[in-house]
Amino acid sequence: MTRWLDDDEQRAWRAFAVATRLLNDRLERDLLAAADMPPTYYELLVLLSEAPQRTLRMSELAHWTNSKPSRISHAVGKLEQKGWVRREHFAGDRRGWLAFLTDEGLAALQAAAPRHVASVREHLIDLLTREQLRQLEDISHAILDHLGASVPSSQPPTAPVDPAG
Amino acid sequence: MTRWLDDDEQRAWRAFAVATRLLNDRLERDLLAAADMPPTYYELLVLLSEAPQRTLRMSELAHWTNSKPSRISHAVGKLEQKGWVRREHFAGDRRGWLAFLTDEGLAALQAAAPRHVASVREHLIDLLTREQLRQLEDISHAILDHLGASVPSSQPPTAPVDPAG
DNA sequence: ACTGGATGGTTGCGCGCTGAAATACATGCA
DNA sequence: TGCATGTATTTCAGCGCGCAACCATCCAGT
């Protein structure tokens, strides 16, 4: 007994689906041009930049990005190659690893941030009224609550940069 | 001279970014379970199912999905392997090709649709008030207008099924 | 008719991200 | 000491995608 979508729901869903996909594609392309990395990797740098000591455990990175450990390993490996992240043993439990954001990594982030923020503004934020912005946040939180997710803004915001992660 | 995001903007943007990514992941997993194909391929079936004669030209598929020709070729190739789509020459201009949705393809779509609609309902539609639904549509259209995109709801809606594409 | 340039699609190839599974090693507990 | 658990890495394979090269067809100009 399927409850199909009525006209209103259908229109809203389709518009939303297409819009978010297109927006995502666009932001991804822009970010690639600005930072030469996929959004998911950029996200890791943002998380690190806002963490105390610019440091997080691998498992924490996995947690905040809702991803499997292997993905984090791969990603941090790439970032390490670029010299943007360094890995060190976690003193106290040598199974664990800490990922440090290096000065170079922070610099790269700071270099990319303006273009990324501009992109987010141009293709999303500046298109909306203040009212719509609030609505969008409410809607987003409804989704997040339902999916049982947590937004990493609960991270200690010691950000030396505003990367609009 | 970067205009950083203020607190309201930052919160909204982050919530939106995380919510849409998570939602997307979830819907993708569900769809994969229901239809054994990526959302982008499913989208093609939906387009075809709603087109007159369940038929579209390759270039039209490319247009409505904002994708390069090669992607469509690859995708339709896969769908053809499954017996869900058939390709025929376009009479009148033999350079062109028509993609037909087969009976099997339609059946597969109809089989997958209920679970997909349920998923969309569960993780998005049913979470929102009627008011929020309208807000979301407006916001989406703002994005679409700016990106110069078109939503395929301008397709002739002769749908024998409501797949919530 | 012939030819050169568009046009519509395909094919081959490789890139880059991802996850599953196997592995390695540390830890804590019986 | 043993063994399960926890943390992270590594290997491997798969996939979707785009680029570039290619092929077939159409069409305009001569």
Image (cartoon, coloured by chain):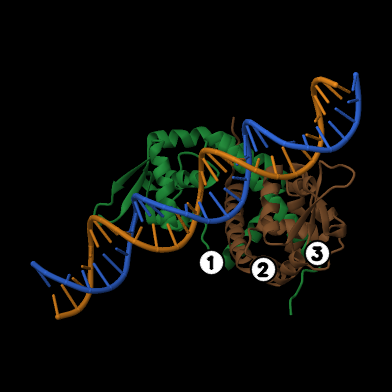
Chain colours: A brown, B green, C blue, D orange
Q: Quadrant of residue D4?
A: top right
Q: Which mark is residue A129?
A: none
Q: Position of residue A116 (x, y in %)?
A: 68, 68
Q: Which residue is mark 1?
A: B148
C-alpha separation, residue under disc 1 versus residue under disc 2? 13 Å
> What chain does badge 3 belong to?
B
Disc 2 residue type (three-letter)? Leu
Q: Quadrant of residue B53?
A: top left
Say whether residue B8 is visible.
Answer: yes
- Name the residue nearer the viewer: A8 or A52: A52
Earlier along the polypeptide chain: callout 1 or callout 3? Answer: 3
A28 with respect to D21 (left or right): right
Q: Position of residue B5 (x, y in %)?
A: 77, 69
Q: Are marks 1 and 2 on the same chain?
A: no
> What quarter of the picture does the N terminus of chain B occupy?
bottom right
- Name the residue nearer the viewer: A140 or B28: B28
A57 with respect to A41 (left or right): right
Disc 3 residue type (three-letter)? Asp
Query: What secondary structure is found at the residue carrying circle 3?
Result: helix
- For the point 64% across and 67% down, the residue is A123
How crowded pointer 3 is (Cα within 10 Å; few <14, some 14-19, many 20+) is rated as few
- Name the residue nearer the viewer: A66 or D5: D5
Q: Position of residue B44 (x, y in %)?
A: 46, 47
Q: Which residue is mark 3?
A: B8
Q: Which residue is mark 2?
A: A127
